[in-house]
Image (tube, helix red, strand yellow):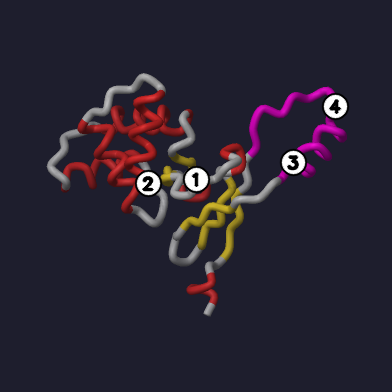
């Protein structure tokens, strides 16, 4: 199953209609190796002969983010398709490594349960609802 098939199934299971614009945003993100902002997605959609305005792209991206289909990459101020959607523990799919040189983004999967427990122990009166890790550096190709 590829990203498009997986995403379409998630959308259907959550009551979303499968529209041309939603599919276009999925296709644009699936083909990208780095994150894209709404303006970049709208421009690529236009090249694919799909009319979509930036505000619509933002609404679609917010829905995809809530469904875990995309991740926001803070360093690049853009969105990235969750290409490792087969991760059994979906809560850990939002950690990324961003190459500062080539701008590629790679998802990092690890179990950070112990880390979260230690934070909760140090801050017992706080309720952690979410967390986000973004590692910055150079990928193996750019490091050479």
Where on the picture, by quarter, is residue 16? top left
Residue 50 lies in magenta, yes or no? no
Q: Quick one: SS at disc 2?
A: loop
Q: Which residue position holds label 4?
A: 124
Tag nearer the camera, 4 or 2: 2
Q: Which mark is residue 1?
A: 2
Q: Earlier in the sequence, mark 3 or mark 2?
A: 2
Q: Earlier in the sequence, mark 1 or mark 4?
A: 1
Q: CA distance from mark 1 to mark 3?
A: 19 Å
Q: CA distance from mark 4 to mark 3?
A: 16 Å
Q: Quick one: SS at disc 3?
A: helix
Residue farthest toward the left in the current orientation of the protein: 49
Residue farthest toward the bottom in the current orientation of the protein: 144
User: Which range of residues does the magenta coloring cover?
Assistant: 112-131
Q: Which residue position holds label 3?
A: 113
For label 2, count other residues whose C-alpha is less than 10 Å away and answer few (under 14), some (14-19) or many (20+).
Answer: few
Which residue is depicted at the point 36% across and 47% down?
2
Q: Quick one: SS at disc 1?
A: loop
Tag nearer the camera, 3 or 2: 2
Q: Are marks 4 and 3 in contact (CB under 8 Å)?
A: no
Q: Earlier in the sequence, mark 4 or mark 2?
A: 2
Q: Which mark is residue 86?
A: 1
Q: Quick one: SS at disc 4?
A: loop
Foreground pick, 63 / 138: 63
Tag nearer the camera, 1 or 3: 1
Q: Earlier in the sequence, mark 1 or mark 3?
A: 1
Foreground pick, 119 / 112: 112
Which residue is depicted at the point 74% across and 24% down?
127
Which residue is depicted at the point 52% across and 57% down?
98
Q: Are marks 4 and 2 in contact (CB under 8 Å)?
A: no
Q: CA distance from mark 1 to mark 4?
A: 33 Å
- Is the residue 90 above or below the residue 126 in the image? below
């Amino acid at each position: 199953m590829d990203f498009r098939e997986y995403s379409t199934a998630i959308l259907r299971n959550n009551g979303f209609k499968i529209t041309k614009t939603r599919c276009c945003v999925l296709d644009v993100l699936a083909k990208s190796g780095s994150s894209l902002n709404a303006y970049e997605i709208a421009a690529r959609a236009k090249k694919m002969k799909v009319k979509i305005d930036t505000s619509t792209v933002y609404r679609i991206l917010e829905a995809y983010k809530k469904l875990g289909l995309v991740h926001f990459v803070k360093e690049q101020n853009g969105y990235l398709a969750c290409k490792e959607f087969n991760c059994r523990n979906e809560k850990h799919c939002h950690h990324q490594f961003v190459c500062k040189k080539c701008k590629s983004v790679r998802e990092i999967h690890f179990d950070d349960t112990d880390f979260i427990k230690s934070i909760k122990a140090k801050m017992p009166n706080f309720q952690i609802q979410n967390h986000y890790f973004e590692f910055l550096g150079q990928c193996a190709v750019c490091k050479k």
